[in-house]
Image (spheres, helix red, strand yellow):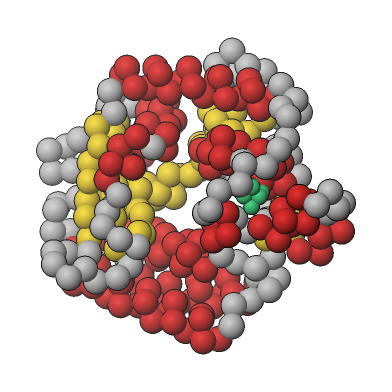
Amino acid sequence: MTLLVSISDWMGFLRCRLQWDWMSPNRMNRMPKRPVPALMFGGAVHLALELFYREARNPVETFMQAMVLANTEAATPLEEAKLMELIGKGEHLLLDYLAYYGERPTDDRDGLRVLVTEQEFKVVIPGMVDAFFVGTVDGLCIDVNGDVWVLEHKTHTRAAPIDGWMLSEQTVGYVYAMQRAVLTGHFEDRGVPRSATVRGTLYNGLQKAVPRTGSRFTRQPIRVSRGALEMFQKRLVAVATEMRDDPSIYPTPTLDCVWQCGMYDMCLTARDGIDVSYMLQTETVQRPDRGIVYRQEE
Ligand code: SF4
């Protein structure tokens, strides 16, 4: 069976095997019916910035439409008051973003040019059969010095978690995938030559609440060395091999489960030895397939 390893699947596998077994596209591929508000909010901001940088569309309008649509399509929608609260927060955030960075993508105060938006990838995992590293990067951009970066938009609640981003597998993994795509000339028609080196990941941080001091927006370039890419590949192969090797399934409860895990109620039921197959059918839905744009086949 084809193995698709995304960063979130990888982190899910290390975080809790039981949650991974329920939610991974490589396993049962289910997701909670009720949307997680923070994920819905983040997804709508991502779409707003994607269309802003690709088509210069007004991000506030895109955000509002995306929130309403996501809630309409959810099997168990959020209450009206909660939805309106989230929409109000997003509207202010994106209006502030335009005021801070510029009303049009071409006006960017840092001189950043976004060349590619929302790029899905599927890269062969070396030495394995029918196993791929998959994901979606928010974009590729070029800075005022002419350096190319993976661009990642991040909404966050408190001050930008820069130390966390430095060690994140995503920081290195997305550069690993995009450098391969660049080398094949996949982005030449969008102004990224195949000779370009992807320097690292540039985090475009948007803080949800206005801080007492300073800006709510942070751009943090994190350089990724050749050594880091080599080490990433070794970890990727190790984790993918473990995933395929019929791993034992067990829960890893922590105090964060109650707010972090959409499968909390099912986990509580399973803890008592009760069969949760009925809950799986009634309280979760099948995750939609991902589309793949950049594909590196063997
Ligand atoms: S509630 Fe915690 S232990 Fe249970 S499945 Fe979710 S992450 Fe795992």
Residue 222 picture location, percent across and down:
25, 37
As drawn, the residue found furthest toward the top would be 127
> Is 265 in front, or is 233?
265
| Front residue of 22 and 102 | 22
Quadrant of the frame with the N terminus: top right
* Residue 135, above or below 42: above
Q: Residue furthest bottom?
A: 81
Vertical position of residue 158 compared to residue 62: above or below:
above
Residue displayed at 22% across by 55% down: 218
Q: How many marks?
A: 0
Q: Is residue 135 left or right of residue 287?
A: left
Q: Residue at x 38, y 81 (%)?
A: 88
- Residue beneath the point at 35% across and 48% down: 152
* Residue at 60% over, 36% down: 13
Q: Is residue 232 left or right of residue 112?
A: right
**Measured from the top left, where is residue 80 in percent x and y?**
55, 86
Query: Residue 244 at what x, y percent from top left?
Result: 70, 24
Quadrant for residue 232, please give it: top left
User: Which quarter of the rendered picture does the C terminus lie within?
Assistant: top right
Asked where in the image residue 266 lies, by quadrant, the reply is: bottom right
Horizontal placement of 41 versus 265: left or right?
left
- Look at the image and tell me whether residue 27 can be seen: yes
Image x and y of residue 251, in percent: 67, 42
Residue 55 appears anywhere in the view = no
